[in-house]
Image (cartoon, rainbow, N blue to C red):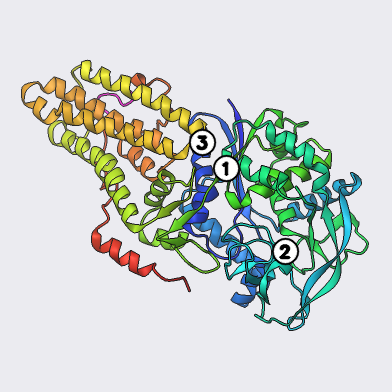
Amino acid sequence: MARILITSAIPYINGIKHLGNLIGSQLPADLYARYQRGRGNEVMFLCATDEHGTPAELAAAKAGQPVAEYCAEMHGVQSDIAQRFGLSFDHFGRSSSEQNHRLTQHFAGRLAEAGLIREVVEKQVYSNADGRFLPDRYIEGTCPNCGYERARGDQCENCTKQLDPTDLIEPRSAVSGSTDLEVRETKHLYLCQSAMKDRLDAWIDSKADWPVLTTSIAKKWLHDGDGLQDRGITRDLDWGIPVKKGDEDWPGMEDKVFYVWFDAPIEYIACAREWADANGKSDADWERWWRTDKGADDVRYVQFMGKDNVPFHTLSFPATILGSGEPWKLVDHLKSFNYLNYDGGQFSTSQGRGVFMDQALDILPADYWRWWLLSHAPESSDSEFTWEKFQQSVNKDLADVLGNFVSRITKFCRSKFGEAVPEGGEYGPQEQALIEELTRRVRAYEGHMEAMEVRKSAQELRAIWVAGNEYLQAAAPWSTFKEDPEKAAAQVRLGLNLIRLYAVLSAPFIPHSAARMLDAMNTTDDGWPEDVAAALSALPAGQGFTVPDVLFAKITDDQREDWQARFAGTRD
């Protein structure tokens, strides 16, 4: 049994996430976690809300709430939506947790002892109207690289270029909108990433199986221009983890907090500690996942994230772990995704553009969205959500192929044999040919899932569904029954066993529907089909079943047009 640690990029606390956020990290991570559990492996799947930094403060101010209260409320909202989407986290933590406070301060102390933190007197933007320094994300303006008018002071979300606030054209305060800004001196701590450049370079070179998207972004940051730069890890904010050197105060840093990009990845580790504390576990229970001297040396650690998060997870977070000099587990595989665009433009949380997770669930059950998003995952390039594509995929893949198969075979069996798996007859050449085809396809499906090739996995799963439909069409038990009821019984028995097989194989993609299929077959046997022939005899003759309600309702043209109009603008 393998041990697999999985983390997905932790979502900002500032509101409900859109479908682009979902497919960029959490959903493919859940697919992989569910698959690995299905294969009998031990999985620890962790995620959390990212609660520090300017997005939290700005969102809380807009909501008219104290920031701590806002974060607690939104964590509950995000946790509930994640659960309804079937995201099977072992723990969904909070970066504001006491565990993350202690661990972040611990890492800072270790890095300081290693000589990898330096104090820098720098110039920062001060807003006279707001009476405060403005951290990077509190400043908006026009991007000098692409001309995007709502670029932030740390990064342009349109072209992903890293920026300094002073780079922006016509900068303004994101708090008040004031342009009455001036530059003042302030002192901050910097992580000496440049000193780690060669170690990081060699480490990335050792990851031959990483996606090209991941390594190309990391290499660009390492080598373009002046190469990897030291990065500020503190901010002039009230909300955040107070700057400390381990347990000790840090002279000159009394009113500062750690920068969100320093503490957020550390939450992956702290989240495991939160899981242990919440479930009455010991330190040894979480350390065996994260400390290579405490059992994590045999753990395979996989991260999932959108491409905008790659630099922080391939460079900054590894620099923190390596620089600490302690035996923490480093990521083994980093699966990154391009962007999912929305109907000719971009999804945007800040602009409320697109379909958001709560809205999606108000329209249709989670599995409809899970299937479309995963089968159209933006792996090799950006992909685009359109309502036409969504309707077509749901209707053809889910309703016409899988749903139709389940409906036809169960209803036919009920009409001719009753609501029990029929006995009699033997599997013949047609059935053996199907078993051989399914064996090849199941092994191919496993290969794609192991390699985290999301789209290819979906295509192979659909082909497995199609094979059952083609068999049913060719075998035509409704015709066979007239001449040879025994042979028809064997054909139907195989068809009912296919439903159980499909439920097991489909569970990582469409868990709620898979559970309904198993329930309809009156079985809890969700064992993986290591032997496909044996799996197709798992339901014995005489076992009762029920005809399920329609698994997937088709999307009508009227529904599609209504939704397209409803989500054409921006969210309030």
Mark 1 touches mark 2? (CB < 8 Å): no
Which image quadrant: the N terminus?
Answer: top right
Q: Name the residue tied to disc 3.
A: 452
Seen in the picture, residue 333 relative to 154 is either above or below; the reply is: above
Which mark is first along the chain, 3 or 2? 2
User: Would you name the residue on which mark 2 appears?
Assistant: 164
Q: Residue at point 25% right, 25% down? A: 494
The earlier-in-sequence mark between 1 and 3 is 1
In-front residue for pair 508/20: 20
State the separation of the CA atoms marked 2 and 3. 35 Å
Mark nearer the viewer, 2 or 3:
2
Q: In the drawing, what numbered circle is on residue 213?
A: 1
**Figure quadrant of residue 231:** bottom right
Q: Which range of residues does the magenta coloring cover?
A: 536-543
Depth check, front residue: 38 or 104 = 104
Q: From this view, report whether residue 266 is shown above or below residue 292.
A: below
State whether residue 536 appears in this view: no
> Mark 1, residues whose alpha carbon is within 10 Å: few (<14), some, or many (≥20)?
some
Dot 1 or dot 2: first in sequence order is 2
**Left or right of 274 in this view: 525:** left
The mark found on residue 259 in the picture is none
Residue 124 x %, y %: 79, 70
Query: Farthest residue in the left direction?
Result: 482
Q: Is residue 401 magenta?
A: no
